[in-house]
Image (spheres, grey):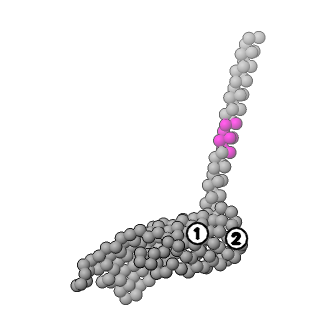
Amino acid sequence: MMKLKTKSVHFLTIVLTCLIFLTNSLSSKAQNDTIVKQKSDFWKKVQFGGGLSLSFSGNYTYILVAPGAIYPLNRYVAVGAGLQYSYASEKYLYDSHIYGMSAVTLINPVPFAQLSVEVEQLRVNNTYEATPYAPEFKDNFWNTGLFLGLGYHSQNVTFGFRYNVLYQNDRDIYGEAWMPFVRAYF
């Protein structure tokens, strides 16, 4: 009788151990599947866009590279970030390197309208060439912009205007506080 009880206890222990192992394995697999699914859902929703500009004429060169991405939180609101680098040069006058980043919130209260709030932080490094009347001059500074925008939105493209509320007439890289924009994310 004792041998039968011992064998039953061993058998029960083995069965319980197998059940615990199987339950933990399935639970772990379900958690991994959920994590993988969440990652894939995130990247499926991310939309990429940005700007690229090249201009060459005579002694002037301008290059702009500005990639960006947004993530829709729901059908009304999306958040995103972008990087920017530009180079401008006019032979015998100046060289300018501007680089930085931005964060944007896009709000679509109705399908055809888009409101935007964008914060931009750029480092500006300007070098003015030496002339017979003046030595070489470097002007390096940070430029911060806070843009409020309104645009017409159709599918993945928005056309509109934005206003830089932090615009400083004497210390800003933009010529005006008001600027038109075209924004596209795919």
Q: In this view, does 166 lie to the left or right of 109?
A: left
On the question of residue 82 being in view, the answer is no
Residue 185 x/y as whole percent: 60, 71
Q: The disc labelled 2 sits on which kind of residue?
A: Pro
Question: Secondary structure under badge 1?
Answer: strand
Residue depicted at 62% across the width and 76% down the height: 150
Residue numbers of the magenta segment: 23-30
Residue drawn at x 69%, y 76% is 112
The residue wearing badge 2 is: 109
Where residue 160 sits: x, y (%)? 60, 79
Residue 126, quarter of the rendered image: bottom left
Viewer-nearest residue: 46 or 40: 46
Please tell me which residue is depicted at 65% across the width and 78% down the height of the picture: 152
Mark closer to the chain start, 1 or 2? 2
Lateral position of residue 4 relative to residue 66, left or right: right
Residue topped by disc 1: 117
